[in-house]
Amino acid sequence: MSFQNLLLEQKNRMAILFINRPQALNALNNDTLQEINAAIQQIAADDSIELLIITGAGDKAFVAGADIAFMQNLNAIQGREFGALGQKAFMAVEALEKPVIAAVNGFALGGGCELAMCCDFRIASTRAKFGQPEVGLGITPGFGGTQRLPRLVGEGMAKQLLFTADVINAAEALRIGLVNQVVEPEELMSTAQAIGERILSKGQIAVRLTKAAVNNGLQTDINSAMSIEADAFGLCFSTADQKEGMQAFLEKRKAEFKNQ
């Protein structure tokens, strides 16, 4: 599938998805959100892809936000539909069973911060800037910002960022737990890919079951979450990868996982 606002590259078992509207600082419009959803479905169906990195084209922006020129004249019904479209696309990213890393190379504001937050974790360039500036435009976040930000940084810090529309730098994002690591711009993609390679060296059935257990467990009470974990743990023992992983450990050799 070809895209107008995205670039999709594959390096062995890893895919890199670029939001590619550099002339608009990669801002999200209706077409771009639809393409993100379509790209995630394509990646989900492609067994040769086992991990995804999302980043922004150019050196200024990851995603600078939703396209304000597009949103300016929407009415209430159209605004809700646009928000629902963004939520659908970002829920698809979050629900992808394969690991997803955000490599944040510049501005990640509004919808850009929301896109980064629906990834499994975030690696940031020193140039990265994060924020939810929507209240300064007279709107709320619409693509999950009011829900994912408190889950990542805590209610109090999230409310401060949401209410003030403050934009924070990468160092502050690291301090509050919004990103996992900050690196120089020229090291961003190599760092994200190196982490990806470490993940890909493990048993991918176990990685995917772990992701599902974390994501699903966070949506329920602790007792139900423990049951989710127990089911995932037990299921692993039906796989050839579990046999290979434990046999390799006992034989002091590198495991050769086959996703079986």
Image (cartoon, rainbow, N blue to C red):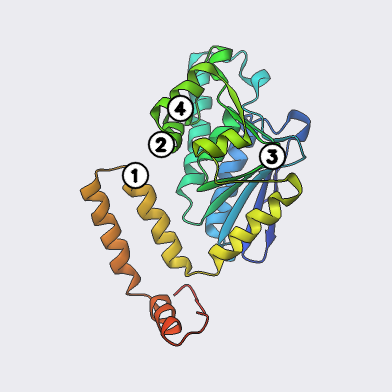
Q: Would you say the residues marked 4 and 2 are in contact, meaning their CB atoms lie under 8 Å apart?
A: no
- Crowding around mark 4 (Cα neighbors within 10 Å: few <14, some 14 to 19, many 20+) is many
Disc 2 residue type (three-letter): Arg
Q: State which mark lies toward you, 1 or 4.
A: 4
Disc 1 residue type (three-letter): Leu
Q: Would you say the residues marked 4 and 3 are in contact, meaning their CB atoms lie under 8 Å apart?
A: no
Measured as percent of width and height from the top left, residue 193 is found at: 65, 58
Measured as percent of width and height from the top left, residue 67 is found at: 65, 24
Relative to 199, residue 149 above or below:
above
Between the residue at mark 1 and the residue at mark 2, the CA separation in whole angstroms equals: 9 Å
Residue identified by numbered label 1: 218
Between the residue at mark 1 and the residue at mark 4, the CA separation in whole angstroms equals: 18 Å
- Crowding around mark 3 (Cα neighbors within 10 Å: few <14, some 14 to 19, many 20+) is some
Relative to 217, residue 239 above or below:
below
- The quarter of the rendered structure image containing the C terminus is bottom left
Whether residue 191 appears in this view of the structure is yes
Q: Residue at x 43, y 76 (%)?
A: 241
As drawn, the label of residue 126 is 3
SS at circle 2: helix
Disc 4 residue type (three-letter): Ala
SS at circle 1: loop
Q: Residue at x 53, y 37 (%)?
A: 175
Residue identified by numbered label 2: 151
Between the residue at mark 4 and the residue at mark 2, the CA separation in whole angstroms equals: 9 Å
Between the residue at mark 4 and the residue at mark 3, the CA separation in whole angstroms equals: 21 Å
Measured as percent of width and height from the top left, residue 132 is found at: 55, 25
Q: Residue at x 53, y 58 (%)?
A: 45
